[in-house]
Image (cartoon, rainbow, N blue to C red):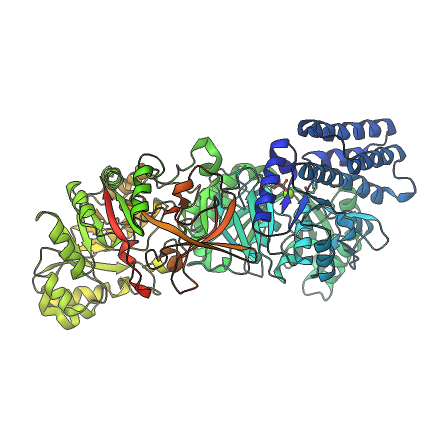
Amino acid sequence: MKFGGTSVATLPRWQNIRELVASRRAEGARVLVVVSALTGITDALKQMCAQEDKGKRVEAARAIAQRHYDLLDHMQLAVPATLAERLSELAMLAEDGPGAMGELAWAALVQAHGELMSSALGAAFLSHAGLPTEWLDARDCLAAVALPNQNERTKLLSAMVEARPDPALNARLAELGEVFITQGFIAREAQGRTVLLGRGGSDTSASYFGALLKAQRVEIWTDVAGMFTANPRQVPGARLLQRLDYEEAQEIASTGAKVLHPRCLSPLREPRVPMLIKDTNRPELEGTVIGPEVREHAPSVKAISARKGITLVSMESVGMWQQVGFLADVFAQFKQHGLSVDLIGSAETNVTVSLDPTENLLDSDAIAALASDLAKVCRVKVIAPCAAITLVGRGMRSMLHTLSGVLAEFGQIRVHLISQSSNNLNLTFVVDENVVDDLLPHLHELLIAAGALRTDDSALFGPSWQALYGSGEVAAPAASWWRTAERERLLRLGAERTPRYVYHLPTVRQQARELKSLGAVDRLHYAVKANTHPAILKALAEEGFGFECVSPGELKAVLAAVPESAPLLFTPNFAPRADYEWALTTRATISLDALYQLENWGELFRGREIVLRVDLGRGLGHHEKVRTGGSGSKFGLPVELVDSFLRLADAHGVIVRGLHAHLGSGILDEGHWGEVYGQLASLAERIGSVAFLDIGGGLGVPSHPGEARLDIAALDRVLRSVKAAYPHYQLWMEPGRYLVADAGVLLARVTQQKGKGSWRYLGVDTGMNSLIRPALYEAWHEIVNLTRLDEPATGLFQVVGPICESGDVLGTDRRLPEAQEGDVVLVAQAGAYGKVMSSPYNMRDEAEEVILD
Ligand code: ADP
Ligand code: ASP
Ligand code: MG
């Protein structure tokens, strides 16, 4: 667990650290804490090094010491001996100056004191707070390697470590204790001198330790809940990236996202140690998981980042054209000066390269020396200060067509260089530094609007920074009826009998009314597959909803429960002929989604008005298995077959009255339905007979803490703007989950517990037989011990059911109070796709359903 500068600077932060470390201990893990210096201390030490006046150096060292005394005061701790030693050493270094040690080695040792001091302070605090913690000198574990072409500066201030799994270190630590604290940022080289890993290098220390110890996980605890699609301080609308693979994360970090040190991912790749980025202050937020591979449904730009302080070196030579060895000659100069080149652009008579300040210790002397040597072989122009703006995403080349609006933006400004990385992960533009701050938020917005940054993919893109942190607009905890007003009743119901589904009708009505506020929508159908309980069907009929059914069984359930007048839709998929035959005897409007039905059973539909379900060529949703569009899904008629369908319809006297598309579920991006609406409308223009457009459902309900709810007013604005262009079509929608998910809970009772290695299992009396969503979709449902709702959640459990399948897990890594047999456990948000997807598997009793009104 690595804690950055702001995470270690105050007493409340250290209290958080204590709790977080304790929780990992409770999971049975041994913990190595890696800390940065307190915020501002590395800068202060660096300034102290630049100070030639001894008196001022000593004064600076005193001020730095005072910061630590102040924090200890707050902690009500005496100065521990380990810290006192460091402080007197620092005072001496200030007093003596570089001396025989040499300027660079002295500066490295001085700056190393930031981390040496913060870790000494942390060891004292944690031990005092009941968590015995061993202080470890990172320099004894991390050995810097000498690399060819390193100069003295990079060797001492930007060193690298080769971190291979080291079982001996692991064994040594195992003998010493369970919790350790050590320093980020520092290592030791072969001659025994202290070296630094480069600014921000504590992340990389954590990764080196993660690789050496082959850790279960490296956790980076900082002041934001993960890696975002842009620097959130600059772009408040930036979205949390929930999952990234090593390569993409590496690319985002090395193109400017300061949240991770650019070198901190490569040590983890080979040992395949996953990394998690979390907010020390808001540990309940999900954060970013970085690991070996991430499946995604469509290529997307993942982030836009910017690096300032870039220097461009432009080299002109008329004689260079096809001249053998010209590039070798110029690059030899860069090597000589210890400068690493980042981007390259070349032409007949010009080569331009960029120098990145994070990889190079750039100063005006270094550049001037380089330029004067280069001048011997070509004409040199140095362009600075510049900034590099980078779009990152796997498969950039396949996304170019989506970027036209974004590229147009660069027409307004001077672009010095464009470079596309050969790993196909990034596209970079070098521009003048002063335009970047204004440009970035704008580009981020354009990327989303253009569909290049596919924020509708809710498995990858989490909430925006603003939604998580800004203006207190954090999503309210999902449907709290069970937490408050109905808790006692639920406890009684659970004590009587489990498993039980309990549905809260007032919540269903409330959701229905919210959707009815969508002024642009002419007709709402409830997709009954989500929950077919008659009381729910009745309540929604009373709210004026129509019903969308996918089987004769569902149609019969609706016909039995609701009045004659409620509109019905029948939208089956790969159903037998008999289903259509029967449905045609009801009042349902029938939808077709293939050529087959008219080709083979055309007579059935003669003279009928039908709906055509089309596939717009892509799918969306919170999991691969809920995406219902694109050639990988079995739903809908591909758009390119629409004309053939229309010919068949004509031949059989069938009238296409409606067009329908539904791309998937769990979508939390309002823009999505506007897109579908627009596409269907323009298709309808070609058909003539169409009177209504059904843009499907899929309205997401946030499940994870911090996810923002759909903004229904914003959705209405999106829909109204499309409707203004196509007022002649009625607009239909068919939400399911949105109406019922939060209205239902599953009650179960604790059966048994078991500890296995570092894992603790909490058994309840029903599992995937009642609720299959976690197993099928990796869906996340909040789980609480309703009996002990007010007790502190001190244990970390895997909540499992009694079914003979290893996938029978309702929730992983859940923080819950210590439980007892018979406690009532509640699984939230189970009103949709709960009971309806349950099964008699293992011949266990099915959950009973109870209605609260
Ligand atoms: P620490 O001191 O914990 O190491 P840093 O300041 O080094 O923290 O890194 C966290 C900061 O990185 C955030 O506060 C944010 O301002 C910045 N940052 C820049 N780009 C990004 C991004 N794409 N995602 C998240 N944070 C970013
Ligand atoms: N303290 C060092 C710095 O400020 C290293 C770090 O915080 O990651 O650069
Ligand atoms: Mg950092």
The percent coordinates of residue 133 (x first, y second) are: 69, 44
Q: Is residue 599 left or right of residue 140?
A: left
229 to 163, vertically: above or below: above
Q: Is residue 720 left or right of residue 63?
A: left
Q: Is residue 501 left or right of residue 822?
A: left
In the displayed image of the protein, which residue is found farthest to the bottom?
600
Which of 351/529 is in front? 529
Q: Quadrant of ligand 1?
A: top right
In the displayed image of the protein, which residue is found farthest to the right?
100
Residue 595, image quadrant: bottom left
The percent coordinates of residue 402 (x first, y second) are: 43, 53
> Would residue 273 be seen by someone viewing this image from the given angle?
yes
> Would residue 678 be seen by someone viewing this image from the given angle?
no
The percent coordinates of residue 559 (x first, y second) are: 12, 53
Q: Quadrant of the C terminus?
A: top left
Which of 711/9 is in front? 9
The percent coordinates of residue 699 (x first, y second) are: 31, 47
Which of 366/327 is in front? 366
Identify the residue shown where x is 19% and y is 44%.
540
Q: Is residue 369 left or right of residue 403?
A: right
Residue 174, image quadrant: bottom right
